[in-house]
Amino acid sequence: MNGRRPVVALIGLVRVSTDKQNTQRQHDALDPICLKVFEEKISGKLATDERPALLNALSYLRDGDMLCVQEVDRLGRNLLEGLIVLNDLFQRGIAVKVLEGIAAGEHTERSLILDLALALSEDRRRDIVRKTKDGLEAARRRGRVGGRRPVVDDNKRAAIFARRQRGESIRTIAAGVKVSIGVVHKTLAAAKDS
């Protein structure tokens, strides 16, 4: 490509809501076709002006370039937030290319299909949250509690107490028992409260 930028370029945006989520699937879709891909691990609830990676992508775009996302819900977590971002983009004259879902294609203005895709994404997310909540409640009724297994078992708890009685610092205890300083604090505080 003789070092020059293409006349029309796709500029990608990858977004997940938390640091714990993986962006690889989105990168696999966008990296091969986009000139540059911006990544954000931030809630889609934030307005456009509070999303640094989105702002960086927008400032990188030139006339005629398109912002590219794997699915339209990467622009916002629900219908309203997605519409706010899309309206902002379209008012700035920025087109959006969506790779997957019912809104797949190039868009220069709001349309029923974009609105519907965002509404369906919001409904799907709400359904997942409801099913997760119902599943956790059903497990609780059966006596099972979800979540991570405790870091401190009875042996580690006994070692923490014994080391503390010998006058060891919390930092030394944490290193010796191979747990975090916060876990030592929490274990000692729980014993004090009971």
Image (cartoon, rainbow, N blue to C red):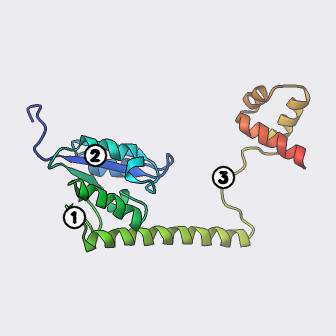
Given the current orientation, which residue lies at the most extreme left position? 2
Q: Secondary structure at mark 2?
A: helix
Q: How far apart, in angstroms, are the residues tagged by discs 1 and 3?
A: 45 Å
Crowdedness of circle 1 by 10 Å Cα count: few (<14), some, many (20+)?
some
Can you identify the residue that label 3 sits on?
148
Foreground disc of the pair 2, 3: 2
Q: Position of residue 139 (x, y in %)?
A: 68, 69
- First reached walking from the N terminus: tag 2 or tag 1: 2
Image vertical order of residue 17 relative to residue 118, above or below? above
Give x and y (percent) for residue 52. Answer: 39, 43
**Marks 2 and 3 close (CB-CB < 8 Å):** no
Disc 1 secondary structure class: loop
Residue tagged 1: 109
Q: Which label is found at residue 25?
A: none
Q: Quick one: SS at disc 3?
A: loop
Q: Which residue is mark 2?
A: 58
The amino acid pointed to by label 3 is Arg
Residue 90 in which image quadrant: bottom left
- Counting residues from the start of the chain, the first of labels 1 and 3 encountered is 1
Please identify the quarter of the rendering in which residue 167 is found. top right
